[in-house]
């Protein structure tokens, strides 16, 4: 299946600190590559995988479930675990959801978490119809390019595949069941004006993780895809500062 422009995964080998950067639902690596490249330029070993069903055609996504998307993140984790001393996981939107799941599953194997407009639920009224709708309607109109900065394109699907969307809700349920397993340092960037993910998502995450080191940064000049928006540098620089601070605290604790 041919890939959409710039949908190839990103990989950079640097030092012994590994960082996984995940794109979101119906998106592709293009939406997080500037973030990943910024981290790589600082010397880290970075991977931004392409999740199964993404970056091709929306119809392909309906043939995948959340376990497929998570399996790619876990595969990337295993790859980095073989060559890195510590691993951080970061993600945009559903990429943040997958980052939380990885932190739940890997425990001390994850040194820290950075999330940008993460999702663990939806307040859309039609969410309750997904179990039935997915069986008769293949897709809804998508929500793509929610970006305040002009002339930006995340390369996402213009349709929201409903079978995949239903599976996403199952991922959210799994995350919520195990959320107290998340005790790693966590930094969350939230756009004040987000037309895709409601602010109640970040509020719920920060209220329920067991992390003692937890911080929220509100972005005032970006919409949902903040990694391509006006506050991108705030995210990039803040992520670097977070990684370096967590690493320094671990050294001090030794």
Image (spheres, grey):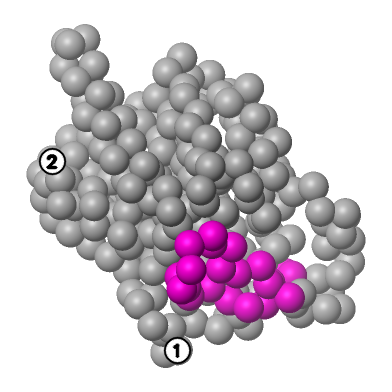
Residue drawn at x 40%, y 24% as measured from the top left: 185
Residue at the spot of label 1: 1
Residue 10: tell me if it is visible.
yes
* Label whose residue precedes the other's in the sequence (2 or 1): 1
In the image, residue 64 sits, relative to residue 216, either above or below, namely below
**With 51 as the anchor, is 161 left or right in this view?**
right
- Write down the region rendered in magenta: 141-163
Where residue 29 sits: x, y (%)? Answer: 39, 66
Residue at image coords 18%, 39%: 17
Image position of 117 (left or right of 167): left
Residue 26: x %, y % from top left: 57, 68
Label annotation for residue 15: none
Q: SS for tag 2? A: loop
Q: Is residue 108 left or right of residue 38?
A: right
Q: Residue furthest top?
A: 253
Q: How many marks?
A: 2
* Label number found at residue 16: 2
Instruction: Tell whether position 150 is magenta.
Output: yes
Circle 1: element type: loop
Residue 42 pos. (x, y %): 15, 45
Residue 201 horizontal/vertical position (percent):
66, 38
Q: Quadrant of the C terminus?
A: top left
- Asked if residue 254 is positioned above or below residue 133 in the image, the reply reads above
Q: Residue at x 17, y 35 (%)?
A: 85
Q: From this viewpoint, is residue 95 visible?
A: no
Please identify the quarter of the rendering in which residue 178 is found.
Answer: top right
| Quarter residue 64 falls in | bottom right
Work out which quarter of the rendered image holds the N terminus and state it. Answer: bottom left
Residue 28 magenta-drawn?
no
- Label 1, residues with CA under 10 Å away: few <14, some 14-19, many ≥20: few
The structure residue drawn at horizontal position 19% and vertical position 20%, both measured from the top left corner, is: 248
Seen from the viewer's position, the closer of residues 7 and 217 is 217
């Amino acid at each position: 299946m041919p890939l959409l422009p710039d949908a190839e995964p990103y990989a950079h080998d640097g030092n012994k600190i590994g960082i996984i950067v995940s794109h979101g639902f119906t998106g592709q690596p293009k939406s997080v590559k500037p973030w990943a490249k910024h981290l790589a330029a600082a010397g880290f070993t970075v991977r931004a995988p392409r999740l199964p069903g993404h970056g091709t055609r929306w119809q392909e996504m309906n043939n995948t479930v959340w376990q497929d998307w998570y399996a790619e993140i876990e595969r990337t984790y295993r790859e980095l675990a073989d060559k890195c001393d510590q691993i951080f996981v970061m993600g945009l939107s559903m990429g943040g959801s997958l980052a939380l799941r990885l932190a739940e599953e890997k425990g001390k194997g994850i040194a820290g978490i950075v999330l940008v407009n993460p999702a663990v639920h939806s307040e859309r009224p039609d969410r309750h119809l997904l179990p039935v709708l997915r069986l008769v309607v293949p897709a809804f109109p998508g929500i793509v390019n929610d970006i305040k900065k002009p002339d930006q394109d995340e390369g996402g699907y213009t349709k929201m595949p409903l079978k995949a969307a239903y599976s996403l809700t199952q991922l959210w349920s799994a995350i919520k069941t195990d959320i107290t397993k998340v005790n790693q340092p966590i930094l969350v960037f939230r756009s004040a004006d987000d037309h895709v993910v409601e602010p109640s998502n970040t509020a719920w995450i920060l209220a329920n993780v067991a992390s003692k080191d937890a911080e929220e940064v509100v972005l005032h000049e970006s919409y949902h895809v903040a990694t391509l928006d006006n506050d991108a540098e705030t995210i990039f620089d803040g992520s670097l500062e977070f990684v370096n601070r967590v690493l320094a605290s671990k050294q001090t604790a030794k």
